[in-house]
Image (cartoon, coloured by chain):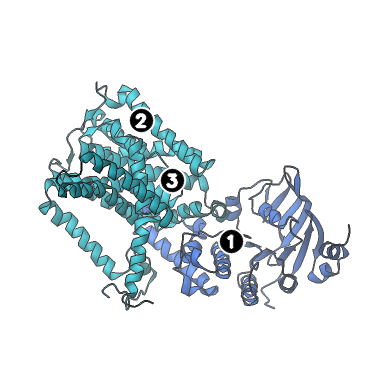
Chain colours: A cyan, B blue
Amino acid sequence: MIYREAGQFKINYQSDSAILPIVQDRMFMIGLMVVSFLVIPVLGSDYFLAGILTPFLILSLAALGLNILTGYAGQLSLGSAAFMAVGAFATYNFMIRIPGIPLLLALVLGGLMAALVGILFGLPSLRIKGFYLAVATLAAQFFIEWALTKFGWFTNYSSSGVISAPEMQVFGIVIDSAAKKYLFTLAIVALLTLAAKNMVRSSLGRSWMAVRDMDVAAEVIGIPILKTKLLAFAISSFYCGIAGALWAFVLLGTVDPQAFDLHRSFQVLFMIIVGGVGSILGSYLGAAFIVLLPIVLNLIGQLFHGAISTQFLSNMEMMLFGGLIIFFLIVEPLGLARLWQIAKEKLRMWPFPH
Amino acid sequence: MNPHRKIGDVILKAENISLSFGGVKALTNISLDVREHEICAIIGPNGAGKSSMLNVINGVYHPQEGRVSYKGHVRDSMHAHEAARHGIARTFQNIALFKGMSVLDNIMTGRNLKMHTNFLQQALYWGATQREEIRHRRKVEEIIDFLQIENIRKTPVGRLPYGLQKRVELGRALAAEPTLLLLDEPMAGMNVEEKQDMCRFILDVNDEFGTTIVLIEHDMGVVMDISDRVIVLDYGKKIGDGSPEEVRANPDVIAAYLGTSH
């Protein structure tokens, strides 16, 4: 009943093509932003901020990156973690090799480096599609992991291959506390999400979806296929690169190739499958789901005070993941975001059936 | 008939086109001319090479021999997106819409060549991109209006019935403001009312925008009614070319259609 758009008329194309055309949605988004920027950093405990929200935001960003490539442009990739690693290591190297470089600039440069590598590994996409392209991106995953451990230059010849991230400073403010780290991440993720939303609702996004849905028709319309695909690889890898840098600098405090292994790539892929392929909201829902599921399971385990062993719980987690992925692939291939959309459509009518 | 609609000079010229896939000869030494503002129908039995001919004209297939010139641009092999840039748009025999997108987005995609903001401007959106989107939206709404599909503009095309999908596909082709429109069986699988609507749209497009139209169609009633000229293909060869009356009287055409022994 509350969620009604009756009486909300759009009198120009500008308001009709707004990101959130319905007033209630706009109110909710403003409320969400106020709470996440002003309330949560003050009230949230360090564990909540650093242990749940920050990883959730960073993984959402990585999922968003993969969703641009796989969900919007239709190019399946298993190399997200590799592009995250490139972003993390490039940012680290820019910071130690150019003294006094601002953190934000290093981050952007790191992202651009990831974008370049993304374009390189995106080149085969002109010739191969689907499953075979996924295998080609898998090569990126193995190659980059190998290169980062093999060549000492990347890790600045650190003996263990693991390096601690330098101190972070933005506009003279040292980012050290959990709340500051959370806010820094939130600001970057919010900005990039807005940019992604803007891209997918303008001609670039339509070109991506055109290439995904029917590439011959897209070419006949005059969309340059290779350029569109490579731009998807570049922008997707940029997002993954920034996410990787944040993961290393903000969350772990170390830059380590092990943090970006194949397991991470699959994790990001599962997020978009569960959350929703081709949906920005889906990237967030998927990330929330995959970050929260182990925590919730853990809480359930604690309820039984050791009656359930931790080993059983971690096995349980794997089984649930597997089951859910199969469930979503069969029942709702467009994921949680699609379920949410159906719920909204029903809510518009509620309590009437039609 | 509208005085503006005067058939002009030859704008599309295909000369001695031969196309084969491995050992299968799809087209053998075909030459055809299409004049400005005319409606030209290509007919022929199944497998005669009609769709292949359209694919050659807009650069999806590259013929082994022969060349196509459009408005003075001569080419042996041109890519489909270059043909689009020269003003050739088309629809497909099996609907080739972007299934995951709304009707509005599908038609907006048709205007992609006319949009020039880069991805950084689009990421910012406000400013140049928004102005561009609104300018093109206005034009797209005119097409939606023309095709009478206002009520479904926000519907994903995958949910639409077949006849409407065909209409949306025509809209997407029109969005590019083409000078030459290639329609591959625009009326296949439609009922009588839908066919009448589609005929009216085709005639209106030709009449109002002066668009040259090449269409493939199996419904002889429709073909004879709306076309200025009919080209008949059979087994990849051209067996007839002329006004509907001439073609109807052509003994080769009658043989091909009635199945008289060759």
Residue A16 location (% of width, % of height): 37, 69
Q: Amino acid at mark 3?
A: Leu
- Distance between the Cα atoms at labels 2 and 3? 24 Å
Q: Quadrant of the N terminus of chain A?
A: bottom left
Q: Amino acid at mark 2?
A: Glu
Q: Nearer the viewer, mark 2 or mark 3?
A: 2
Q: Are marks 2 and 1 on the same chain?
A: no
Q: Which one is nearer the viewer's eye here, A212 or A273?
A: A273
Q: Which mark is residue B95?
A: 1
Which residue is denoted by mark 3 in the rendering? A231
Residue A21 location (% of width, % of height): 33, 68
Q: Quadrant of the C terminus of chain A?
A: bottom left
Q: Are marks 3 and 1 on the same chain?
A: no
Side of A310 where A283 appears, left or right = right
**From this viewpoint, is residue B125 visible?**
no
Q: Which one is nearer the viewer's eye here, B37 or A248?
A: A248
Based on the displayed image, in which of its 4 quarters is residue A202 positioned? bottom left
**From this viewpoint, is residue A48 visible?**
yes
Q: Secondary structure at mark 2?
A: helix
Side of A302 where A341 appears, left or right = right
Output the chain of dot 2.
A
Residue at image point 41% right, 34% down: A140
- Distance between the Cα atoms at labels 2 and 1? 44 Å
- Distance between the Cα atoms at labels 3 and 1? 27 Å
Q: In the rendered picture of this protein, how many numbered marks are placed on residues? A: 3
Q: Amino acid at mark 1?
A: Ile
Q: Which mark is residue A145?
A: 2
Q: Secondary structure at mark 1?
A: loop
Q: Secondary structure at mark 3?
A: helix
Based on the displayed image, in which of its 4 quarters is residue B122 positioned? bottom left
User: Which mark sits nearer the N-terminus, 2 or 3?
Assistant: 2
